[in-house]
Amino acid sequence: LLPRVERYVSEPEAVQLLEEYGIPYPAHGFARDAKEAARIAEELGFPVVLKVISPAVLHKSDAGGVLVGLEDGVAVREGFGAVVGRVSRAVPGAQFEGVLVCKQAPDGLEVIVGALEDETFGPSVMFGLGGIYTEVLRDVAFRVAPLRHRDAEEMIREIQGYPLLSGARGQAPLDVGALVELLLSVSRLVTEHRQIQELDLNPVRVYEQGLLALDARMVLNMDAEGKRTP
Amino acid sequence: MTDGVEALDNLLNARSVAVVGASNDQGKLGYALLDTIRRSQYEGALYPVNPRADQVQGIPAYPSITAVPDSIEAAVILVPAAYVAGVIREAAAKGVRVAAILSAGFRESGRPDLEEDLMQTARDCGVRLLGPNIQGFSYLPNRLCAMFWPAMTTPGPMAVVAQSGSVTAALAEWAAEEGLGVSAAVNLGNQVDLCESDVLEFLAQDEHTKAVALHLEAVKDGRRFLEVAEHVNLLKPIAVLKTGRSAVGRRSASSHTGALAGRDEVFEGACRQMGLVRAGDLQELYDTAKALAAMRQPCGNRLFVVSTSGGGGTLIADEAERRGLVLPPLPQALIEELQQLDPPPNASLANPVDLPSFSAGLFEGAVSLAVRHDVADIYLISFGDPVPGSAGAVQRLAGQMQASLGVAYFGGGEVERASRIDLHRAGIPVWPTPERAVRAIGAAVRRAAQLSDREVSVAAQG
């Protein structure tokens, strides 16, 4: 058996794949230096978020590689130096590719959408509410890809926290239709890219109209020659 | 190569069977196997194969399969693992196309080489295999019970398909003891060839099977299972119990999805996708399969309950709430008609109806009136005492109603034991506690609701 290698996929690469499948991600640009970051931020409009891109840093937030709520060009230039500095202190010698500058998404209900290659059933898709709902309560639903429309609908309705989406306690209902489309897109994505071992879109913010995937983490399953292991 | 359904048909409906490894020694499994086949009243031709005996258990024996003068349809093989491949070659030479391998000592005992050799030999010879490492199989319409035990002679509507031999035997035995019976019991074992999907496809077209109790440890081909089980489940409802064994696949520590997909979460999702009823333990698997096999499919979640004891009625009402069943209030007109039946003064005529009485006629009358008012989708009669004549009364009710009907019988001693068997023979499900009755009914209701939701959504989209 060949050794399995987990290949790191940088967020800009992952985001490109998401966009091919029509998965909404905030407007963004990739910057190699502070000046470029500020220019991109001006174009996007404030506030913006900075995310360090480095193969050594899979958990960007834990390593201090994410800055949110930057309101002007000065803040972006200073922020650039700050995140790069924090990451190199947290992970000494970390290879640094640059910074992703993203238009900051409005607040909204956070959910998690994921996928993995199950050893019995193959590509499978997961849905759950974000934060404590998944991490503590494990309130998630799985289905085997490719999903049919009804599978996506049923897995959303199946979780305990569904009333938070459908409009609990007098709140406006959120865009469950967009969530169904997202699950179907993720299902297509992993069905057509079997080298994806695991995929997290976490968090995804859901609004009364539409949604945004704010972070994409992807693990590929390849052998030493770059072929997918069975 | 014979297709899976045809191979299983040849095996389960075999008119002539060679039993290779049949023994005269009562201490050996080879004795138990032939003894069970004989006690199951198999009417086809039996050919014990044993190189050291002219007769086995009084039946003429042959030194090898090829020495049998007549043609043989199926072989049941119980020889040491190292000799099985050789027997398959001989069986193939004799024209046998399917064999059940009861022998152990393959992959499960650290000998994957023997298993590989067996698979290769079977493929080369064109023989389809059930097993190895199984307790055997039974098919009641053919009165063929090729298992170590139990010898089953009670035909019924439930098919048992299980990875484990003990689970196969236990479920089939429970069904036999209660008079419910099984159509088929198939132990899957190591599944080197014929697998759960093949057996489900056979059962889908088997007129004697109404529902399937399925126990799995690992699924051989997940994608095929998804497709087959979803289709079969529409024809023959499937209740499934999945237990451990399959190791958690290697998953990355860096993804939330990987961390949240434990041993079972994807399988659970797949079951929901297929519309299968998932049981949490062996008893629930049996109880639920009984509901699917012996109760008419519920058209809704309204439950009418009549009980000999307030205690039983309350247990049912509590569990019903947890299982999403609704006990609708009774219309005034029905309550007045119930009063005409002259119930005991301490009766309670609200749903659950409490009739502290040993009169089977009173129960028959009460349910009959409730059915006429169409108050529920499922009618559950709870006998918490010995009620003479109860089996006859319930059978008469079953004959005059279209809605689902079930019985909880407990605390009824000899009358209960006899009634349970009579009712099961008449195709009416009986559970031994109120809660188990409600859990099984609840599962059948959820399955029916899910499938009808889907029909509606397909109709709306089409």
Image (tube, coloured by chain):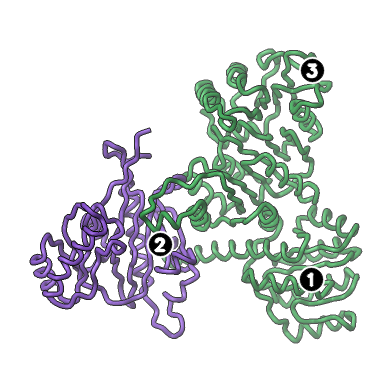
Chain colours: A purple, B green
Q: Is residue B126 visible?
A: no
Give the number of the disc on residue B312.
Answer: 1
The one nearer the camera, B250 or A173, is: B250
The residue tagged 2 is A149
Specify the amino acid type for callout 2: His
Which type of secondary structure does the marked residue at label 2 adopt? helix
Quadrant where the C terminus of chain B sits is: bottom left
Label 3, label 1: how far apart the Cα atoms are:
57 Å
Q: Identify the amino acid type marked 1.
A: Gly
Measured in 3D between alpha carbons, the distance from the residue under mark 2 to the one under mark 1, in whole angstroms, is: 43 Å
**Label 3 Cα crowd, 10 Å radius (few <14 / some 14-19 / many 20+):** some
Provide the chain ID for the residue under circle 2.
A
Name above or below for residue B108 compared with residue B321: above
Residue sitting at 31 percent across and 47 percent down?
A220
Q: Nearer the viewer, residue B250 or B298?
A: B250
Residue B131 found in image quarter:
top right
Q: At label 3, which amino acid type do we have?
A: Pro
Please identify the quarter of the rendering in which residue A45 is found.
Answer: bottom left
Where disc 1 sits, the SS reads helix
